[in-house]
Amino acid sequence: MEMLEFVRQMTAHPAWKLLWPLFCGLGVFLMGLVLRRFLMRSLSRWAAATKWQWDDLLVAALRGPFVLWCLMAGLYVAVVASPASTNVVSISGKILSVLWIFSLTLVALRIADQIIRKYGTTLAATLPLTSLTQNLAKGIILVVGALIILNSLGISIAPMLTALGIGGLAVALALQDTLSNLFSGIYVTAARQVRVGDYIKLESGEEGYVVDIAWRSTRIRNLPNNLIVIPNTKLAQAIVTNYDLPSKDLAVLAEVGVDYRSDLEQVERVTCAVGKQVMQEVPGGVPEFDPFIRYHTFGDSSINFTVILRAKTFVDQYLVKHEFVKRLHRAFTQEGITIPFPIRTVIMQAASPASAATQGKEDKGGQK
């Protein structure tokens, strides 16, 4: 009876009207934390039991925001339990609803970013991993979240879209170059003719590895490790040689010349043997490729031919050709095959007696 009387006195006290909402909100918040712990454990066990990795990303993305959601639920219950007016409760509910949708949008942004980064190589055929595609994905999620927030506030979207359509023409004229680069970047990314990591060469002479395709420009890192920035419109209109398409491996051509007195069958046999050795031992060579040669020119001092090798990537050709020249020179020296110096034969025609006498008279007249 004493306990019941104490409770009655507590509830009748004026301060109880402030303490009761606080207790209710705190109780909901603590219950949410308990629920979060149980739910996170269950989701973590489920994610660990599966072979996919997207569920691990989902669990990691929900850990932090779940505490915020528990706090928001506690605040809403506290406001409802308080003696506040109906308008205050309604406004508080709308504010918390907007915050909840906004937090969900941020969670979706984080999950989308992690999925694009983690599965970028797997999804490369449909969604190339560039800063442009990442920003486009984030932009779409933000637009959808903003539309949901506006709809929850009871704001009509149709008039806003009409106003944006009218004002968009002026914006498009003002940002013509920027929008041109943006859509050119989307085209280059979607066409899959230039990809991040490819080694390309432009008709103007710039060449290197594609580092990134952004909303305005494409960055290329050349072999001296300098960065080349090319506007997307220029790249979309340029003639581009992509050394990684249709495959990364490429033919390596080496020009060689031998003496006219050489046994061409022996030259071909020795050259192909050296080429096969280079293919199997030098990093960057294609071991299963069989090198071959093609004679093509009777030069001034040599019979010239082309050796066809193969490298795994564009940059590998330099080491392959370097080792091939060294080993071929050593093999030719051992086999007695000569790579001749440039030689030119000059034929001097003897002058006739009459012309010699005439030349002598001219010389004497000149001396006089």
Image (cartoon, rainbow, N blue to C red):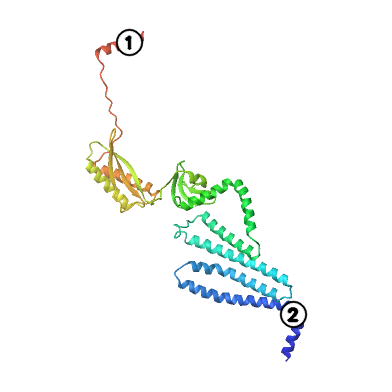
Q: Say above or below: 157 vs 289.
A: below
Q: Which residue lies furthest to the right in this view?
A: 14
What residue does disc 1 label? 362
Please tell me whether mark 1 sits on a helix, a strand or a loop.
helix
Q: Can residue 230 be seen in this view?
A: no
Which image quadrant is residue 207 in?
top left
Q: Say above or below: 159 vs 240.
A: below
Mark number displayed over residue 331:
none
Please tell me whether mark 2 sits on a helix, a strand or a loop.
helix
Amino acid tagged 2: Trp
**Crowding near pointer 1: few (<14 within 10 Å), some, many (20+)?**
few
| Image x and y of residue 185, in percent | 51, 50
**Residue 262 relative to residue 180: left or right:** left
Amino acid tagged 1: Glu
What residue does disc 2 label? 16
Q: Say above or below: 48 vs 158.
A: below
- Decide which of tag 1 and tag 2 comes sooner along the chain: 2
Residue found at x 67% / y 68%: 94
Disc nearest the viewer among 1 and 2: 2
Q: Which of 61 and 246 is in front in this view?
A: 246
